[in-house]
Amino acid sequence: MNIKKHIPNTITLGNLLCGCLAIVKAFEGNLVWAAIFVGFALILDFFDGFTARLLKVASPIGKDLDSLADMVTFGVVPSIIMFQLIKHGSDVYRLSAMQLDNISETGFMPYVAFIIAIFSCIRLAKFNNDTRQTGSFIGLPTPANAMVICSIPLIAHDTYHSDTFIEMMLNPVVLCVVSVVMSFLLIAELPLFALKFKNFSWTDNKVKYLFLLASVLLLIILRFVAIPLIILLYILISIVNNIFSKKQV
């Protein structure tokens, strides 16, 4: 039996397991741990594809498994986290594990969060059938979207920020707007570079290296607030890179 071909799929299933554990924590109201499990899943999601290319064992089944795991971890989980954030408002950051009762009256608004799961599903289906996305992305990848959503409870629990900032960030209307905007970005016709390394040369990967360096610096300086800024930087660098690429052609 060729054990090598099962290694990337095992890593992918680890991603799915992290997503399941994140769902449990999100329903318990412990959104910080839900976000942490998504962080573990992000690492595994990077290494499953990297390992498949390294071992030369990429397969259609591996691609399907990756999308199914991503749907749970980077589609369903962010929706549940956003649902809890909208429903419980600014009380979220005061509790490590909320009691799931109605802390705030937000009516139908929490259910807006589930458009994240719906558009993530569309995004992943498009990715699997779009030949333009073999070496890059069209629209924001679901892991990047999940990073933005999951950064919110992490920022809220960081004592570095003022109560006024946290309460403004956790305003249900603001969170609904974030849900809609991020869902739109998932399916937007926006070309974005992929963090896939075929080799490690500076010439072929300078945009990726500069992005990673800037991301590390932002994380050191701004901590969790850096996460949504990193995704914004990712989009802006992609747009600039696309403009320069067209000019060179």
Image: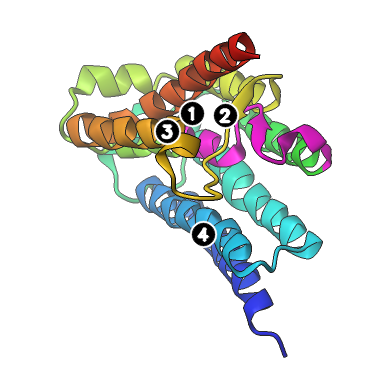
Q: Is residue 133 magenta?
A: yes
Q: Earlier in the sequence, mark 4 or mark 2?
A: 4
Say whether disc 4 or disc 3 marks the residue closer to the N-terminus.
Answer: 4
Residue 48 visible? The answer is yes
Disc 3 target residue: 206
Q: CA distance from mark 3 to mark 1?
A: 39 Å
Q: Where is mark 2, residue-wise?
A: 110
Disc 3 element: helix
The answer to whether one can see residue 107 in this image is no
| Residue closer to the observer: 40 or 48 | 48
Q: Could you classify mark 3 by the number of other residues whose Cα lies within 10 Å: few (under 14), some (14-19), or many (20 or more)?
A: few
Q: Are marks 1 and 4 in contact (CB under 8 Å)?
A: no
Residue placed under numbered mark 4 in the picture: 47
Alpha-carbon distance for marks 2 and 3? 41 Å
* Mark 2 nearby-residue class (10 Å; few <14, some 14–19, many ≥20): many
Amino acid type, residue under disc 3 in the picture: Lys
Name the quadrant of the N terminus.
bottom right
N-terminal of the pair, mark 2 or mark 1, is: 1
> In whole angstroms, how far apart are the C-alphas of marks 2 and 1?
5 Å
- Closer to the eye: label 2 or 3: 3
At 51% from the left and 50% from the top, the residue drawn is 199
Cα–Cα gap, marks 4 and 2: 33 Å
Dot 2 falls on a residue whose secondary structure is: helix
The residue sitting at 56% across, 46% down in the picture is: 77
Magenta residues, start to end: 129-149
Of all residues, the one furthest to the bottom in this rendering is 1
* Rendered-image quadrant of the C terminus: top right
Kindly identify which residue carries mark 1. Answer: 86
Q: Are marks 4 and 2 in contact (CB under 8 Å)?
A: no
In the image, what residue occupies the spot 52% across and 36% down?
144
